[in-house]
Amino acid sequence: MIKLIASDMDGTLLDDAKNFPPDFFSILDRLERHDIQFVIASGRSYRALKPLFNEYCSRLTFICDNGAFIVRNGKTVFTSAIPAETLKDIVNNCYEKLPMAYLVMCGTKGIYVSDRVKPRSEKELGFYYSSRIVCDDLREINDEIFKIAIYDENDPQKYSYPVLNRIYGNDLTLQVSGHLWMDIMNSGINKGTALESIRDSLGITSEETMAFGDFYNDIELLKRAEHSFVMANANDDMKAYGKYTAASNNEYGVTKAISGYLDKNGLL
């Protein structure tokens, strides 16, 4: 029997207009009745996720910032701060080698940006980082920073990621997390290791776990679940990482698969 379900947000649970499936919150209630844990596993920060779930926040687990920040039942249970000298080095290299990249620093006290580069799409930024503190120098932030997000309108997979991976690929976790985004975290930090730590704390096995994802930052998450679903809208090279294919995000594939499982097992 499934005891834990983990789902990515953008491109997976949410449709392209950033809406939940119409039956999502009724599905959450149904899962709760049968003591099945639901985990949001997102590249977004908790500040961006919390307003979307309202009173459900105290009843869910959130893997935020691709695993660098975990919240369970409304309480922070894990953060992984990047060393200050490493942060300064990353910012220096981005300023020098990626002059058009827009940096977002995610910390325990806030989310920080510089006005050094002006992004074209405020709407895109607002989906993920709606509340931002503008700083003169990102190297002087007095906070624990656990993720650097890079907004690259030139395509991070072709531009930012190859540049930074050559420098930090052996020492940090670098992930392309969207068509315009890549993220940098401490080594070993990803959605999969976060899910594994949650499962271990609850005594839940991989065989009792279901997971949904659509993009490269979901690969480790999918690997930790025996019942792994890649969305039909995912890139073709992602399909190898799922045991099953779920209907697309615009067809609400996550809740279709979950309700199908619940119906099949008589879990009303």
Image: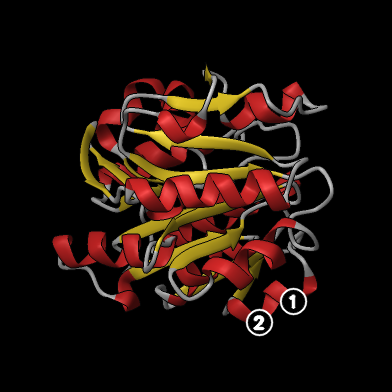
Task: Give coordinates of residue 179: x percent, y percent.
Answer: 75, 51
Callout 2 amino acid: Ala
Task: Give coordinates of residue 44: x percent, y percent.
Answer: 51, 39
Give me the disc on residue 237: 1
Callout 1 amino acid: Asp
Task: Give coordinates of residue 204: x percent, y percent.
Answer: 22, 68
Q: Quadrant of residue 189?
A: bottom left
Q: How many marks?
A: 2
Residue at 42% of width from left, 60% of height from top? Answer: 191
Kindly tell me whether residue 31 is visible in this rendering: yes
Task: Give coordinates of residue 126: x percent, y percent.
Answer: 64, 23
Viewer-proximal residue among 210 and 120: 120
Viewer-proximal residue among 107 and 16: 107
The quarter of the image holding the N terminus is bottom left
| Residue topped by disc 2 | 240
In this picture, residue 217 sits left or right of residue 237: left
Secondary structure type for disc 1: helix
Residue at 64% of width from left, 48% of height from top? Answer: 94
Q: Is residue 33 above or below residue 107?
A: below
In this picture, residue 58 sits left or right of residue 159: left
Neighbour tally class for label 1: few under 14, some 14-19, many 20 plus, Cα within 10 Å: few
Neighbour tally class for label 2: few under 14, some 14-19, many 20 plus, Cα within 10 Å: few
Mark 1–mark 2 contact, CB under 8 Å?
yes
Residue at 66% of width from left, 82% of height from top? Answer: 240
Viewer-proximal residue among 141 and 145: 141
Residue at 56% of width from left, 59% of height from top? Answer: 257
Kindly tell me whether residue 41 is visible in this rendering: no
